[in-house]
């Protein structure tokens, strides 16, 4: 029995990490969230991830330690090869992915469910401003790019015939988690039929 891969992505500030963490807390062992390797300082704010140097990341990649890996925003990201073992055991596995790698993920994992987390643009602007990592101009450019990418991205998924869903995380987190879990359950049922 093969498991269900749920590949989650969305713009910075959309609340992916909170959504994923709450979903796994709520369901206990029913869902497994893969912890990523990222080439950034362990002290950096954000998701709970393994922090590695670029040199260590490259060495891990060379010896096949990752089921998936990509580079974005000046960082390298890797999903441990354990992903394939968990899927082979029939588990539902959540991955915090990237739009840049999504097409590759869809080609590698035939039954992947792609979930795009979106947030109303004004709310996303407020979240990114609170973080204080970028200037207002950089954030404005990011928001415009996100809109273009999301539209192109969704159209590309449709053309590939990929299974995907869009989750709105603009309201309370609990509602978004419920929508997310319902989406996974429906996708799992339809995959088994």
Image (cartoon, grey):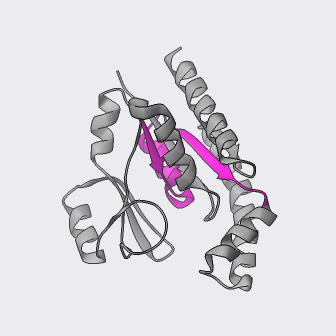
Across and down, in percent, residue 165 comes to 65, 39
Residue at image location 44% in from the left, 74% down from the top: 44
Comparing 164 with 170, the one in front is 170
Comparing 68 with 185, the one in front is 185
Based on the displayed image, in which of its 4 quarters is residue 59 positioned?
A: bottom left
Across and down, in percent, residue 119 comes to 73, 56
Q: Is residue 158 visible?
A: no
Horizontal placement of 178 versus 28: left or right? right
Asked if residue 190 is positioned above or below residue 96 in the image, the reply reads: above
Residue at the left extreme?
63
Q: Which residues are magenta?
A: 92-120
Comparing 23 with 107, the one in front is 23
Residue at image location 69% in from the left, 40% down from the top: 175
Q: Is residue 179 visible?
A: yes
Residue at image location 68% in from the left, 44% down from the top: 167
Based on the displayed image, in which of its 4 quarters is residue 125 positioned?
A: bottom right
Across and down, in percent, residue 183 comes to 62, 32
Residue at the top extreme?
193
Across and down, in percent, residue 182 comes to 62, 29
Asked if residue 40 is positioned above or below residue 90 in the image, the reply reads: below
Horizontal placement of 171 versus 78: left or right? right
Comparing 155 with 171, the one in front is 171
Is residue 163 shown in magenta?
A: no
Asked if residue 40 is positioned above or below residue 188 in the image, the reply reads: below
Residue at image location 69% in from the left, 68% down from the top: 127
């Amino acid at each position: 029995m093969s498991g269900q891969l749920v590949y989650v992505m969305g713009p910075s500030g959309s609340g992916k990490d909170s959504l994923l963490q709450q979903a796994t807390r709520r369901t206990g062992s029913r869902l497994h969230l893969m912890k990523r390797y990222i080439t950034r300082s362990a002290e950096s704010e954000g998701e709970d991830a393994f922090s590695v140097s670029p040199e260590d990341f490259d060495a891990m990649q060379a010896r096949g330690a990752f089921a998936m890996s990509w580079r974005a925003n000046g960082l390298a990201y890797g999903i441990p090869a354990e992903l394939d073992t968990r899927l082979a055991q029939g588990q539902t596995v959540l991955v915090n992915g990237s739009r840049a790698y999504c097409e590759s993920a869809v080609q590698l994992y035939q039954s992947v469910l792609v979930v795009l987390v979106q947030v109303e643009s004004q709310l996303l602007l407020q979240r990114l401003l609170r973080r204080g990592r970028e200037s207002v101009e950089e954030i404005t450019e990011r928001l415009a790019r996100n809109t273009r990418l999301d539209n192109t991205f969704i159209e590309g998924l449709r053309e590939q015939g990929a299974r995907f869903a869009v989750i709105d995380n603009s309201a309370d987190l609990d509602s978004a988690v419920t929508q997310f879990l319902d989406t996974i359950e429906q996708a799992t049922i339809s995959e088994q039929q």
